[in-house]
Image (cartoon, rainbow, N blue to C red):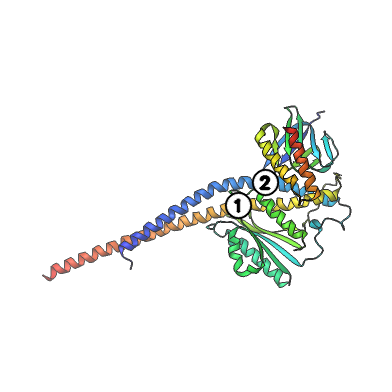
Amino acid sequence: MASLDDLKKRIASVKSTQKITKAMKMVAAAKLRRAQESAEKGRPYSEKMNNVILNLSNGISDKENAPKLLSGTGQEKTHLCVVMTSDRGLCGGFNSNIIKKAKSYFAKILDEGKELKIITVGSKGNDQLKRVYGNKIIENVSFKESKNANYFDADKVGKMVIEKFEAGEFDVCTIFYNQFKNVITQIPQAQQIIPLNNEGEENSSEESYEFEPDEDEILSNLLPKNISTQIFKAMLENSASEQGSRMSAMDNATRNAGEMVDKLTIEYNRSRQAAITKELIEIISGAESL
Amino acid sequence: MSEEFKVEIVNPEKSFLVKDDVSEVVVPAFEGEMGILKDHISIISFLKPGIIKILSKSGDENYYVEDGIVEFKNNNLSILTSTIFNLADMDKSKQQDLLKQAEEEANKTDINDQSKYLADQKVEVLKTLN
């Protein structure tokens, strides 16, 4: 059994850990509010963008010659996966959920004998993936310096993806991120951004648009922007999810620490009492023997 | 019948501006400036660097944009843009900064014709502001 001194030290250490997790929870809660707000504010843009593209692709007359970003390269040999994770740890299952989702997708692709390329955004994802898929990772980006998700960063990733697409380095691009549902639930998502997947989304309005300049030109201008927009949306969702996940993880940690302190305190009191009793018995039996 | 329609400007971070008493909007469309009045035919177009003029009862507003898409439908005008500044809030130093950036971009030699054209446009528009 641990000595009284040891127990005392352990209680103190658990208590200070609890203080840290409590503080982290508070910080995460504050950041979550902001991240959630910006995720909600960012939605109209990506929704409108999607709408416009939907209208455009419906209006396009010559499907054969549609831009490659929309219709794909006609084959599905090389897959590019953009795995978006956080730069910081201590956020519960946030990163591992994305990684798990991504890994099962990777396995599927490799089973089908297709080629796999990975871009990791955020250092945690890179850490987890490089052990198994190290040779597949072609690029690793992290935005440690930027405080909040901003469009400029997303645009950088988007431009990189498009550059690689135009160089013919891959045929299909999928992004992995956590969609923010609420503080407790974040759903890992795999979203295909190249070629654009519009199936099942029929445009209800039959209204015809006037295009200036013509559809093809607008589309070829719009599609690259859409890539960045989708990545930005994923970043916003991700940052809200990260804070939410961290908040609930830290909440749990704080509670667990509390339980542990209680248990240790009981043990401490018991052994203190045991020591006193032992001493008493010794004294009494010593007095009796006289 | 009122001659007003709704305009909404959205940038990636947030909904930048919503106004529903607008009588006319002039946007710098890619093939030249385009004025939009109520009951305009549905149109999709994209923007080049320039000034968006919004004319409304509550006063006129001018915004500087670098790129974007406009969609007009059912008397709803949506403008999606990644860079937008209200001219009223833009001071000289900000203008100078943007101008400097644009000039640097325009002077690059390794860019394609379209980006070159866009950068030149930026410089031109920003110069007229000063």
Q: Is residue A199 visible?
A: no
* Residue A24: image tag: none
Mark 1: secondary structure: helix
Which quarter of the rendered picture does the C terminus of chain A lie within?
bottom left
Residue ID for mark 1: A239
In the rendered structure, which amino acid carries the disc numbered 1? Ser
Kindly state the secondary structure of the residue where label 2 is placed: helix
Please indicate whether residue A151 sits to the left or right of residue A290 in the image. Answer: right
Name the one closer to the observer, A139 or A97.
Answer: A139
Image quadrant in which you'd find residue A270? bottom left
Left or right relative to A100: residue A161? right
Q: Which mark is residue A42?
A: 2
Q: Which amino acid type is shown beneath numbered disc 2?
A: Gly
Residue at 31%, 62% (x, y): give it.
A5
- Inter-mark Cα distance, 1 to 2: 12 Å
- Mark 1 Cα-neighbour bin, 10 Å: few <14, some 14–19, many ≥20: many
Looking at marks 1 and 2 on the same chain, the residue that comes earlier in the sequence is marked by 2
Measuring from the top left, give residue B22's x and y in whole percent: 76, 31
